[in-house]
Image: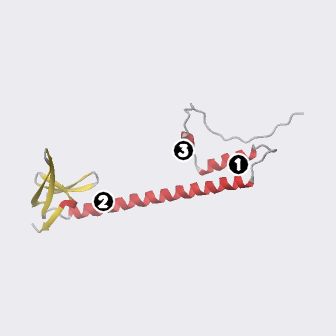
Amino acid sequence: MESTIPTVGIQGTRGQQDGTNAPLRDLDMGEFIKLMVTELQNQDPLNPMENSEILTQISQIREIEASDKMTKTLNTLLTSQDAVLLGQSLSNAGSLIGKKVTGQVETKTDDGVKVENITGVVDRVSLESNKPILHVGDKKFPLNKVLDVRAA
């Protein structure tokens, strides 16, 4: 008499196998738990998984989930902090429009870098590589190179 053991499968799509673990990178915690349950249901009844192995897997799942949540939270905080700092810097630079400033302009030459102090009224402010740039006539320099500020 032949007996069959019912199995539970994971629904998914089939695609070309390229030998990488790309599908595992997008595996969320719910799918991972389904895979683990399927593994438990389909284990060899004569050689079942040890309790310590199951506890180890559960512990690893919790560690991965906690690490993932912490990474997402830190990324959100860093993005928010960067946006706030950029806004503050841009606001500071904008407050210099119409004021007489002295700043350093660095120019690359064949001999190295030439540093020149420029004094004039700030015409406008722009962003380059997420850094505020002050424009004085045809010269420009970053906000962090301002040496002096005076009323125009």
Question: Residue 7's x, y, as percent?
Answer: 75, 41
Q: Is residue 116 left or right of residue 65?
A: left
Q: Residue at x 75, y 52 (%)?
A: 50
Q: Is residue 81 left or right of residue 150?
A: right
Callout 3, which amino acid?
Arg
Whether residues under marks 1 and 2 lie with C-beta atoms below 8 angstroms apart, the answer is no
**Which image quarter: residue 14?**
top right
Callout 2, which amino acid?
Leu
Q: Which mark is drawn over residue 37?
A: 1
Callout 1, which amino acid?
Val
Q: Which quadrant: the C terminus?
A: bottom left
Q: Which mark is drawn over residue 25?
A: 3
Q: Which mark is drawn over residue 86?
A: 2
Give above or below for 37 relative to 69. Answer: above
Question: Residue 17's x, y, as percent?
Answer: 57, 32
Q: Residue at x 62, y 38 (%)?
A: 12
Whether residues under marks 3 and 2 lie with C-beta atoms below 8 angstroms apart, the answer is no
